[in-house]
Image (cartoon, helix red, strand yellow):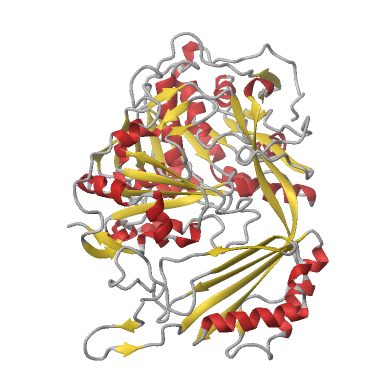
Amino acid sequence: MTPEAGPRTPEAGLVPAQAGRPGPIRIANCGGFYGDRLSAAEEMVEGGPIDVLTGDWLAELTMSILAGNRLKGRPGYARTFLTQMERVLGTCLDRGIRVVANAGGLDPAGCAEAVSALAERLGLRAAVAHVTGDDLMPLAGPPVNADTGETLRATPLTANAYLGGRPIAVALEHGADVVVTGRVTDAALVTGPGMWWFGWDPGDLDPLAGSVVAGHVIECGCQATGGNYAFFEEVPDLAHCGFPIAELYADGSSVITKHPGTGGLVSTGTVTAQLLYEIASPRYLGPDVTARFDTIRLEQEGPDRVRITGVRGEPPPDTLKVAVTYLGGYRNTMTLVLTGLDIAAKSRIAQEAIWARVPRESFEQVHVELTPLGADGGSGSPSPSHTGTAHMDAGHTSTEHTSTEHTGTEHTGTGHTGTGHTGTGHTGGGRGEVNRRDDAGTALLRITVMDPDQRRAGRAFSSAVVETGLASYPGFYGLTPPGDASPYGVYWPSSVDARAVLPVVTVNGIRVEVPHAPPSGPLLGEQAGGPPPGGAADAAIPPYAGDVAAGQVAPLGTVAGARSGDKGGDANLGVWVRDPARYPWLAAFLTVDRLRELLPEVGDLPIDRFALPNLHALNFVVHGLLGRGVAASPLLDAQAKALGERLRAVCVPIPR
């Protein structure tokens, strides 16, 4: 099956109105990333009634992985999707369950062809559609970085526009049992089936926005049902966490739930955590609609059932986001363990020995990260005597975060702090108290070199580290054997005029063009309510009358949850309180300046703060924390997954 197969039909921009059906449509997720639980598809199909089975395979990192696979002659799609389809395709066809997945990656046509071959081998008749048009290679000109304004000088490996849900709806309307896409927005996997089921057109902004929010909640699988939840000890049977289901209604409202009898938890807390994941402004831009996250209302409808209502929509931007990747070079990482006294001095000696054997300035980039593990092996909570800030041990900082962007030019900032040892070094209290040296403990020294020359960054570096094994600091041992350098990709966000991108659906030998269809006529949603543009969200925060510096000192995480993640080279950090009465305090206390104080690793990087009073939450975007994105980041926490937990561990004054 190829994009050119079969006769060509007239273009199809809208789903016919007769597609409308009574709600709700039950849309299940069976995967949040390439590598998620293989049994999930079978669990969702067999665990209870569903109408659509979806899965999200395409993180930004995945596109680089698939590009590497394609260069090696391997498929450019997610092969685990085929394993899952082998287990459930027959049942889905019998029960009328439609399958929608972005597992096509860089080769949706090839993936669809493989699914068709699988169906034939199983003796099944399945209409398998695929969506193309997201692949913009070869580019007409060098792409401009949407974040920095830079023009790419390297040769792109991939360039894919983020398509919306309309092509998915068209595929379903044309009888597809399975729809395989390439790069679409994660939420499109829910919005597309909603368009098909209810017959929404581009002007139905509020319903579209509601579907985007539902899609955002379930796209990451178990993160909506208790996975990675700040208050994880409240989640029952997390080891057998069920995957989420969105019951989507014609007005765009939804209920988030899971199959009965599965582990996990669906609560306003777990849903709030996922709503705050990998977002920026409350205006959540997408190809179908701009969803206003500051209009979301959550209600615990029953056990493991959270209703989402009130979402307002605005017209989508006239551009589509484009994910460009290119080969950045080669990198190699060696990790040494430092133990006992004089951690900072041992780090210095280790590096001096290494650079004496292979000059530091010979590499294009060098990144050194020193991460303490705690004097007593624990989390190392800050001392209560240091109100409002984390306190690191005297004699060393938690991270030496040094990056040589170009030979001879160093940029040094602090790294992962906030969970260091107590300032006193004491454990316990009263009788039996043990007094430790302030700089005693265990730390990881992680050294990464990056260079266009694979040989220079390869064994020449890692062998030099090993050679220091008997001529370095006392207690020397490493966690990484000497190895060759590996290639790394760089993510380059860009944009393209939406009218310049033509999605194409191929189904049953028919090729259907789906041109850009902006809203026309009355815009149902833009004037329907919700906060007006500007700083309305901040204006809606009730003032805090107390002293933000007063209160009992305790970890912030005792009253606040957090979830963090990556958005290209930026990190997002969402923080919320479960008690609405504490939100005025949180909003007054956790300013941008305070965040810098509590998380010194953010340094002087630009930070945006957005208030979401409707969720009792704040969202911070730390620009540039992850450099050129996860694929190229040398950080230990390359996706900023633990940034929120580092913040929650910091002791601050909390009002009673």
Q: How many marks?
A: 0
- In this rendered view, identify the residue nearer to me: 63 or 370: 370
Quarter of the C terminus within the rendering: bottom left
Based on the displayed image, in which of its 4 quarters is residue 26 positioned? top left
Identify the residue at image location x=27%, y=65%: 554
- In this rendered view, identify the residue nearer to me: 557 or 16: 557
Q: Position of residue 269 (x, y in %)?
A: 31, 47
The extreme top residue here reads 521
Based on the displayed image, in which of its 4 quarters is residue 635 positioned? bottom right
Q: Position of residue 404 (x, y in %)?
A: 68, 62
From this view, report whether residue 413 is shown above or below residue 425. Answer: above
Quarter of the N terminus within the rendering: top right
Q: Position of residue 96 (x, y in %)?
A: 49, 29
Based on the displayed image, in which of its 4 quarters is residue 168 positioned? top right
Identify the residue at image location x=59%, y=80%: 347
From this view, report whether residue 354 is shown above or below residue 581. Answer: below
Q: Position of residue 605 (x, y in %)?
A: 52, 52
Can the viewer see residue 80 in this picture?
no
- In this rendered view, identify the residue nearer to me: 565 or 412: 412
Q: Is residue 291 left or right of residue 102?
A: left
